[in-house]
Image: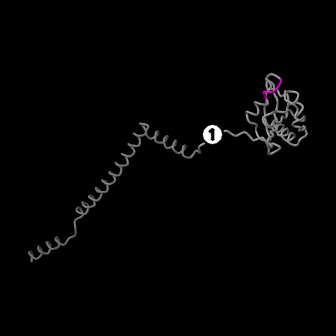
Amino acid sequence: MLAAQSRSVNRTKDSMPIEPDERLGIRGQSKAVVRALITSVVSVFALIVVVVLISKALGLGEEESESTAATTTSSSAPTAQQTTPAAAPVSLSDPRCAPASENVVAQVQAGLTMDGYRFTNATVIIDGRLTFFGATTVDASGQMQERSDVWILRDHVVFASTGGARSNSQFPKASSSPLSISPGDERVRAVDACVVDATRGS
């Protein structure tokens, strides 16, 4: 009977579940793994923080920020084109009017009787063999002497048409033979009006 009880006790011990201290050992191992993972994550985070702090201490972050800001500014800011505004064209009263060539200006200006006088706003209307030349006469100081006068050229021969042109130059009168064109001629008045327009715009 004692032997039977002994076998029964042994079977009871063999069939008993894991002891509490063994269960605690498995939990301890799990906790150790979790702690190791947490430690690794914290270590990586701390390493990142240290690298960032070192970069800031060395100024690398600021240089990169400045470079980024400069790039952003240069890419976002529109390029200003430096342009010089063109002078507004003078609105002339007759579409036939055009700037006189230097040769024509020099030819008429050579016949002026007053020393230092010269032309500005030189304008022409060309009609076949005839060139109606109008200009403003100024003295050596640039002071206006005649607002607008008209000469007529035919085959490079110059004739004085308006009163100021006759008074200030040595050319023959356009109203006399062989030209016989009066100061009231439509073309004379047209080029005269263009010169007046030019003086208002200058």
Q: Residue at x 49, y 44 (%)?
A: 68
Depth check, front residue: 129 or 103: 129
Q: Amino acid at mark 1?
A: Gln
Q: Residue 50: where, in percent of width, then height?
A: 38, 42
Q: Residue 136: where, in percent of width, then height?
A: 82, 32
Q: Which residues are magenta?
A: 109-113
Q: Indicate whether 149 appears above or below 37.
A: above
Q: Indicate whether 25 appears above or below 110.
A: below
Give the position of the C terminus as an image quadrant: top right
Report the colour scheme.
one colour
Residue at which label 1 appears: 82
Q: Residues within 10 Å of mark 1 (few under 14, many from 20)?
A: few
Query: Disc count in the image?
Result: 1
Q: Residue 67: where, in percent of width, then height?
A: 48, 41
Residue 97: quarter of image: top right
Depth check, front residue: 168 or 159: 159
Residue 51: quarter of image: top left
In the figure, is residue 140 to the left or right of 60?
Answer: right
In the image as oriented, which residue stretches furthest toward the front?
178
Callout 1: SS: loop
Give the position of the N terminus as an image quadrant: bottom left
Is 110 in the magenta?
yes
Q: Residue 28: where, in percent of width, then height?
A: 27, 58
Is 123 in the magenta?
no
